[in-house]
Amino acid sequence: MALERVPMTPAGYEKLQQELKQLKAVERPRIMQAIEEARAHGDLTENAEYDAAKEKQQQLEARIREIEDKLARAQVIQSAGANGKKVVFGARVLIRDSQNGKTASYLLVGEDEADFSQGKISIRSPLARGMIGKQPGDVFYVQAPGGEREYTVEDVLFD
């Protein structure tokens, strides 16, 4: 069975690499030092500092494994310089909500890069899935908690 690829932009890939480097080079040694200091305090059975440091170590190692796995399965998609007007991964899409007439701009990125406050939405989000393959002027529908919403693709841009 083939492993599922993890789509990401070059910037998202770089960000994960930097986080991994930080965790291994800075956080891991810091936590190891905290464990050693807590160990020096004696009896480990009732040592809250030791327990807290070991818990942090487990969380850190889990995050390191998660990042390494995502980087190993990464499918870095270059959208810079892409042309055409079809909505694809890495496109910035201007859409208009048909109910209220408001427009919004979204950049379609990988799950780890998504940040709604910055207008970056996951390629796997319902909104992104609804607009994939569309072109300016196309209408698409998204099931929202308040019911189905209708949107129109106004423009498709590539940074």
Image: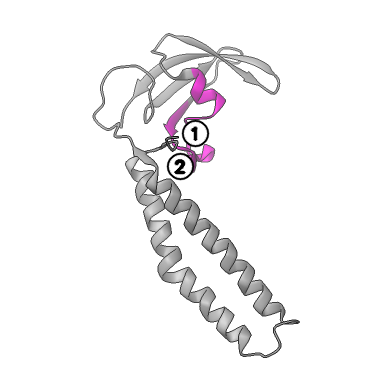
Please name whichever residue, 105 or 149, is drawn nearer the observer in this view of the structure. Answer: 149
Mark 2 falls on what kind of element? helix
User: In the rendering, at what x and y percent does residue 27 appear?
Assistant: 48, 69
Q: Who's the residue at 55% across and 15% down the image?
A: 101
Q: Disc 2 to disc 1, how far (Cα)? A: 7 Å
Is residue 84 shown left or right of residue 7? left
User: In the rendering, at what x and y percent does residue 107 appear?
Assistant: 42, 31
Q: Who's the residue at 61% across and 74% down the image?
A: 53
* Residue neighbourhood size for the residue with mark 2, other residues' Cα within 10 Å, grouped as few (<14), some (14–19), many (≥20): some
Please name whichever residue, 134 or 151, is drawn nearer the observer in this view of the structure. Answer: 134
Amino acid type at image mark 2: Glu
**In the rendering, which numbered label is found on residue 122?**
1
Q: State the residue position of label 2.
A: 113
User: In the rendering, at what x and y percent does residue 140 appear?
Assistant: 52, 12
Q: Who's the residue at 39% across and 51% down the image?
A: 15
For the C terminus, give its image quadrant: top left
**Quick check: is 60 in the magenta stretch?**
no
Q: Is residue 38 above or below residue 60?
A: below
Q: Is residue 29 above or below residue 66?
A: below
- Occupied quadrant, residue 39: bottom right
Residues at badges 2 and 1 in contact (C-beta under 8 Å)? yes
Which region of the structure is painted magenta?
105-130
Q: Earlier in the sequence, mark 2 or mark 1?
A: 2
- Occupied quadrant, residue 18: bottom left
**Quick check: is 127 in the magenta stretch?**
yes
Amino acid type at image mark 1: Ser
